[in-house]
Amino acid sequence: MPAVIDLHAHTTASDGDDRPAELIAHAIASGLDVLALTDHDTMSGLSEAAEAVSGSGMMLLPGIELSAQVIDEEAGAIPRSVHLLGYGVDATNAVLAGEMEKIRSHRDDRLRLMVEKLGSDYDLSWEEVSQAMPPGATPGRPHIAQVLIDKGYFPDTSAAFAGPLRADGPYHVPHYAPRLHRALQVIVEAGGVPVLAHPYTGARSGAVRHDRALSRVLEDYQVFVEAGLAGLEIDHRENTDEGKEVLRAVASEFSLIVTGSSDYHGTRKPNQLGENTTEESQLERILEQVTGVAPIS
Ligand code: AMP
Ligand code: ZN
Ligand code: FE
Ligand code: FE
């Protein structure tokens, strides 16, 4: 039987619901052979996860989902938020540690500002949101969503994100994130293998403008490949069907690693562990390129 490999999952170290040890237990119970831990802008869940995986027979690949942004050169271009997975990164690398700290501190300011703005139309305070946040967690909009749900404003996270938490809504505040070129450098310097998370969730999203001819899309990706981009997370529930076709063409042109993963966040999001998986040959390519930290089993 081929190994079941899921390379994208979150815990209470960022905006997931499971503690790291719970995630590992859940992954083992779900029959996974390999799981990558990829919390947003932190690796603070790794030690607990590593302890839980020890002797279980499952392999844990240390990782991160680093926030980044792309700003097109055209005047008036709106920055696009992109997520960069880094596999096998060494959390003690000073450059990575500094970048994680900077993003997390800006995320904290930004979430407070969003709560202030929301407070004019919703019964909501920072005290309530910070209480809903596990200690030390990377602050994110899902933590606000939880309080709005608990107070009966919305039935679930998706509804809150379709409402006041949406990125183009009146309450949204952006946060600092390094430019994608810098993020790629940071991951590579920390010994990791950079793979773009959910790279095509719509023609206007992603690292490049996907609403252009394929030849131009390829040209734009080439710049990131030259900066160290190693792979694309193609099998992800949020990539569109049309997007997956384009991404396969990009991966084929540049011989990129192709992954598939669940982006599991716990029971409050529909994503289930193992719903999308990565082929063993692609995991091998990742492991060959890692120079940071080895997988744990
Ligand atoms: P933030 O990091 O604060 O910008 O919030 C983005 C995070 O919110 C993502 O990493 C997802 O975990 C979550 N998220 C984004 N869109 C949705 C949605 N439509 N429904 C549920 N969760 C979402
Ligand atoms: Zn998330
Ligand atoms: Fe993401
Ligand atoms: Fe994610």
Image: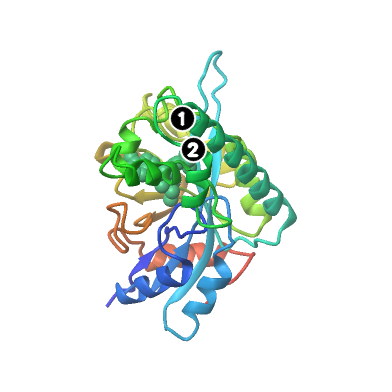
Instruction: Give coordinates of residue 63: x percent, y percent.
Output: 53, 60
Residue at figure coordinates x 47%, y 78% from the top left: 53
User: Please, is residue 181 above or below residue 34 in the view?
Assistant: above
Residue pictured at 36% horizontal, 61% vertical: 278
Spatial CA distance of label 1 from label 2 is 6 Å
Mark earlier in primary sequence (1, 2): 1
* Residue picked out by circle 1: 119
Residue 62 drawn at (x, y percent)? 54, 65
Pick the front one: 58 or 282: 58
**Which of the 4 image quadrants contains residue 25?**
bottom left
* Residue that badge 2 annotates: 125
- Mark 1 in CB contact with mark 2 (< 8 angstroms): yes
Report if residue 253 is visible in the image.
no
Residue extending farthest right: 94
40 lies left or right of 203: right
Question: What residue sits 67% from the left and 43% below the top?
Answer: 102
Residue type at mark 2: give it.
Ser
Numbered disc 2: secondary structure = loop
Residues packed near mark 1 inside 10 Å, few (<14), some (14 to 19) or many (20 plus): some
